[in-house]
Image: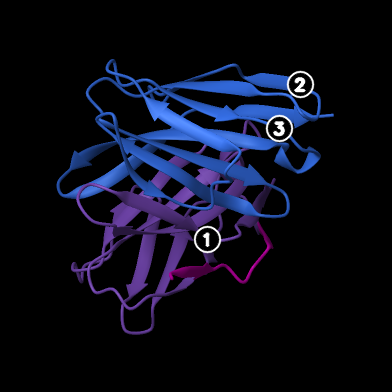
Amino acid sequence: DSGVTQTPKHLITATGQRVTLRCSPRSGDLSVYWYQQSLDQGLQFLIHYYNGEERAKGNILERFSAQQFPDLHSELNLSSLELGDSALYFCASSVSLTGIETQYFGPGTRLLVL
Amino acid sequence: AQTVTQSQPEMSVQEAETVTLSCTYDTSENNYYLFWYKQPPSRQMILVIRQEAYKQQNATENRFSVNFQKAAKSFSLKISDSQLGDTAMYFCAFMKRVGGSARQLTFGSGTQLTVLP
């Protein structure tokens, strides 16, 4: 158990819908990262928040957005869903340990768009 | 942009034997970090080992060790005394600082390792 929690574990929805994925980082971690794992694209970085502020964006679609709240939990919002958005979505949080920023991953949310 | 290449999509090894997984990367950065993560059938991403680019000494973690060749941009993972529980997809990952505290991971495509009884 990494200490990072994600809800829900599974999500089935229809095209055109909107969903929200939730992540709670490890206690004390200020950074939250979101990644998407799909069969065709592999593991891709989406976005990074640090202490409530967006710090970096990766291959995140405009239909996707995220935020980090004062209690440091984060939400990833996916809208106008398409079949190709079906994937495993991970969040990770980080702690600085001897200078290496290691990211610890949550169990993921498996999204299926029908 | 950084790229990470894992040229072995699948590998197998007999229990108790040693196996080496390959990883190469491309970057113009001088200061960066490298990681190996494993993803067992549960799909959880689990950190295996990490290496700082400025350290010449190869990292070791129990049965796991790396061979880090900075000039060659190579970062292979050696698993000794392989166990059935080592069966998983293994991802090599590169991290660089992107200003301030932003540190994103770039992953390779993974190597599926199967440990055979």
Q: Amino acid at mark 3?
A: Ser
Give residue B4's position: percent from left, percent from top: 50, 67
Residue, disc 1: B18
Tell me the colour scheme of the image. by chain
Q: Nearer the viewer, residue A70 or A62?
A: A62
Q: CA distance from mark 3 to mark 1?
A: 48 Å
- What hue represents chain A? blue
At 24% from the left and 74% from the top, the residue drawn is B30
Q: Nearer the viewer, residue A97 or A57?
A: A57
At 35% from the left and 24% from the top, the residue drawn is A25
3 vs 2, front mark: 3
Query: Is disc 2 on the same chain as disc 3?
Result: yes
At 19% from the left and 67% from the top, the residue drawn is B55
User: In the rendered image, what is the letter of the chain coloured purple?
Assistant: B
The correct choice, above or below, for A63 with respect to A99 in the image is: above
Q: Is residue B81 left or right of residue B7?
A: left
Q: Is residue A58 left or right of residue B70?
A: right
Residue, disc 3: A80
- The span picked out in magenta is B1-12
